[in-house]
Amino acid sequence: MKKLFALLLLFCGFETYAQQEKPNVIIIISDDHAYQAISAYGSKLMQTPGIDRIAKEGVRFDKGYVTNSICGPSRAVILTGKYSHKNGFKDNENSHFDGSQDSFIKQLGKVGYQTAWIGKWHLESEPQGFSYWQVLPNQGQYYNPDFIMQDGSRKTVDGYVSNVIEDAAEDWLDKRDPSKPFCLVIGHKATHRVWLPDTADMGMFDKTTFPLPHNFYDDYQGREAAKVQDMNIAKTMIMGYDLKMFGSEGAADKDGNIKRMNAAQRAKFNQYYLPIEADLKARNLSGKALTEWKYQHYMRDYLSTAASLDRNIARTLDYLDKHHLAKNTIVIYLSDQGFYLGEHGWFDKRFIYEESFRTPMVMRYPGVIKPGTVSNNFVMNLDIAPTILDAAGVAIPGDMQGKSMLPILKDKKIKGREYLYYHYYENGEHSVSPHFGIRNKRYKLIRFYKRVESWELYDLMKDPNEIHNIYGEKNYQKITDQMKKELNKQIAQYDDQDAKEIVEKGI
């Protein structure tokens, strides 16, 4: 009996050791953060030392993409490792996430992981399968945000949202069981519209004049869906709601973002924005001059909002260092999609065009990923779930459609994806026509439907900014036929019945 007891103790010890040796995981998801605004990606707009540190100590994915460029669906894809048509959350207008379905979080829980999601959730249902959660209702607020707590209660926390979310994440890490591995998802609100900076960051780019993107005054010739969109800085960006030029303090008082501020926050807000508004009135701008003023002010607010995001990412890394967790913790940073910073004259996202389709993604995995790695393999947010399960030694469920990224990171000889498949469904806000399509290293084929019925084809080597739609040109007929065949293969591979029906109908 003594020998049996000793063996049991030894077995339990080995099991505890094995659990401790499983890598911890932190996934940091931002909202609408453009890769064009990250210095690790070569941006000259601002410095992002927090994100850059992850890239420097791990891998920067230069070909990271999303399956559906809009925030709620992107989070559902990350959780499930499945495309929108499979996980059921296709858009932000009509979808409700079915939390009873499987997720990488539930799979980690089965092997002893403590799991948490803190911050922006935006899936129209309560999180399921987590050891702990604390989420913003809907989009959340920048100042003094409300949180829905796991016990069903709500609480308001004083402060700026990026700081508050990081505080809550560190508090959970402080209280976790240190004998168990953990997986924490930190969901930031920044840099979502309305780009409201922390008071500490207001004005940090006021001395910078940003160059207009060369296609800022795009006329959208040959691109019917681009012609009907409603996400244009000139026409769509709202002076009060977006740019904080309310016209009066009374009008500002009615804005939900502003009326949440306490007296000290509001005083700093007024101190910064009211002189800008007075100067704008004195200039009496119109036409292109006003449009370009809006662009400059948008960029200053957007990048100032991004500064707090990056600072809090750096705080996460510092926490891991301080608590001796860095060596056994995977850290992934990505945005829920890309974003337009004036390219084509736009803000927002949604389109399969590169600025929206492509997302920043960096990953640190000490002992596995060589520091300073740059990957040009196609990867997607779809791949996060299977990658984490692979790292944890958990079998990847057969219905997950993503692929673990670890093989291509460990062995350069392993070939990754040749094609990316995309499907955007929403047919409301910003008047972006639903569409699906594919891209390979050189070409991109798109099928728009509902609002606009059309095809587009781009030669990305000759036309990286996707200005010249070559669909229908004789010189590209062979390429068009090849890309359509591959599109059908991708539709079949991912079992997208909606897309299949549209393609079969023709136009």
Image: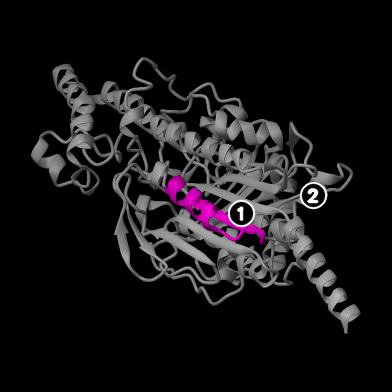
Which residue lies at the image location 48% right of the left edge and 61% below the top edge? Answer: 425
Residue 223 lies, with reference to residue 482, above or below; the image says: above
Task: Give SS at disc 2.
Answer: loop
Residue 415 lies, with reference to residue 271, above or below; the image says below
Mark 2 or mark 1, earlier in chain: 2
> What amino acid is labelled 2 in the image?
Gly
Residue 168 magenta-highlighted? yes
Q: Is residue 480 left or right of residue 7?
A: left
Check whether the beta carbons of the residues at disc 2 and disc 1 lie within 8 A of each other.
Answer: no
Of 259 and 400, nearer the camera is 259
Residue 405 lies, in percent from the top left, at 75, 51
Numbered tag placed on residue 416 in the rendering: 2
User: Which residue is most to the front?
Assistant: 2
Residue 503 locus on image (x, y percent): 61, 64
Q: Image quarter for residue 345?
A: top left
Depth check, front residue: 23 or 214: 23
**Relative image position of residue 248 (x, y in whole percent):** 10, 34
Which stretch is magenta?
A: 165-186
Identity of the residue drawn at 68% across and 66% down: 494
Quadrant occupied by the N terminus? bottom right
Q: Which mark is residue 437?
A: 1
Residue 219 seen from this side: no
Is residue 6 shown to the viewer in this render? yes
Q: Residues within 10 Å of mark 2 (few under 14, many from 20)?
A: some
The image shows residue 304 at horizontal and vertical percentages of 39, 30
Relative to 283, 42 lies left or right: right
